[in-house]
Image (cartoon, grey):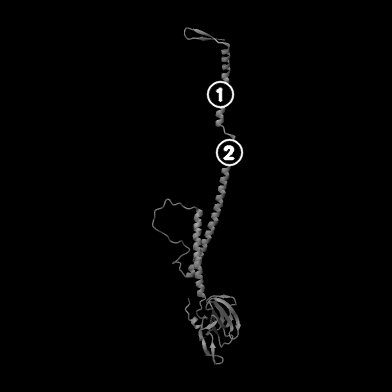
Amino acid sequence: MNIIIVGRRHGESKNIRLSTAVKHLVLGLLFALPMAMGAAGYWLAERLTSDMALDPNAAKAWERDLVEQREELQELRQTSDREMAALTVRLAELQGRVLRLDAVGERLIDTAGLQSDEFDFSSAPSVGGPIVDLDTSYKVPGITHALDELADRIYSREQQLEVLDDLIEANRHSDDTFVAGRPIVKGWMSSRFGHRADPFTGRSAWHGGVDFAGKEGSGIVSVAAGVVTYSGPRYGYGNLVEVNHGNGYKTRYAHCKEIEVNVGDIVRKGDIIALMGSTGRSTGPHVHFEVYKNGRSVDPAAYIHRRPR
């Protein structure tokens, strides 16, 4: 194989003769070079494509992550809905307690006899104070924590109001059961406690009560709150009402025309329990009034003129 090289100067040429081995090498290079270039291009294109393309496993992993995130979001929404429902119920309970506190407060006001211009429990209390620097480091507590603190304060105040109400109620009951006053609505005292001349025999006899005369059918009232322990006729007393007031006190109302209460009835101070009459051993319409203390008859005058509590 000959290779002729032509120069630029004066058309000069140079002839180079190649051996058979060199000839085969050159031919092999000529055939191998395009194949190498094609392989290199294919490899480069494959490398670039693989770098830019998505891995199927990675795509599946991303899809799983998206599904998990959707589930977490759904769970958060459900949790938020449950918490809001629980907060709604809690607020309703607190509002119910506030209404109870308002009712108790109004009752205490009525019991204590306060005027609306002195204390109005239904309105919010008047508050105020000077301007103070705000502490920017303070963080507002969560709504659940705030509700818990509000519930604790309401519970504490509720307990205090209930104790106060019990004390006032007990004091009122003590005042109601305090034996004092006259057993009639209208009338006058016609006979005192102690020895007197018997109206039927004229002889000296013991009178264990006081008599109040009046118009027949006028009201006979209980001098204190209590429970009716006797209601009906009894020898010598005619129609009799007996009331137990507790603390060892008991009162009797005799010679009634009509009885307005039954055994077991609870009566309050000033309730009409019978009508004045002349039943039993009696000379005219009146009420025979007796007071017993610890089972012993005592002079009712001390209780008739007793100042009510």
Which secondary structure, mark 2?
A: helix
Which secondary structure, mark 1?
A: helix
Q: Quadrant of residue 31?
A: top right
Q: Nearer the viewer, residue 209 or 286?
A: 209
- When the figure is inspected, residue 114 is found, relative to residue 15, above or below; the finding is below
Q: Residue at x 56, y 51 (%)?
A: 81
- When the figure is inspected, residue 89 is found, relative to residue 304, above or below; the finding is above
**Residue at mark 2:** 61
Q: Residue 106: x and y, percent? A: 49, 66
| Residue 217 shows up from this direction | no
| Residue 275 shows up from this direction | yes
Q: Nearer the viewer, residue 159 or 228?
A: 159
Q: Residue at x 51, y 54 (%)?
A: 144
| Mark 1 residue type | Ala
First-in-chain label (2 vs 1)? 1
**Residue at mark 1:** 40
Q: Nearer the viewer, residue 181 or 69?
A: 69
Q: Residue 4: x and y, percent? A: 53, 9
Are there few (<14), some (14-19), or many (20+) residues within 10 Å of tag 1?
Answer: few
- When the figure is inspected, residue 146 is found, relative to residue 245, above or below; the finding is above
Q: Nearer the viewer, residue 160 or 172?
A: 160
Q: Residue at x 54, y 57 (%)?
A: 90
| Mark 2 residue type | Ala
- Asked if the residue at tag 1 contacts the one at tag 2, i.e. Cβ–Cβ closer than 8 Å, the answer is no
157 lies left or right of 259:
left
Q: Residue furthest bottom?
A: 202
**Alpha carbon distance from label 2 to label 1:** 33 Å
Quarter occupied by the N terminus = top right
Q: Residue 206: x and y, percent? A: 54, 88
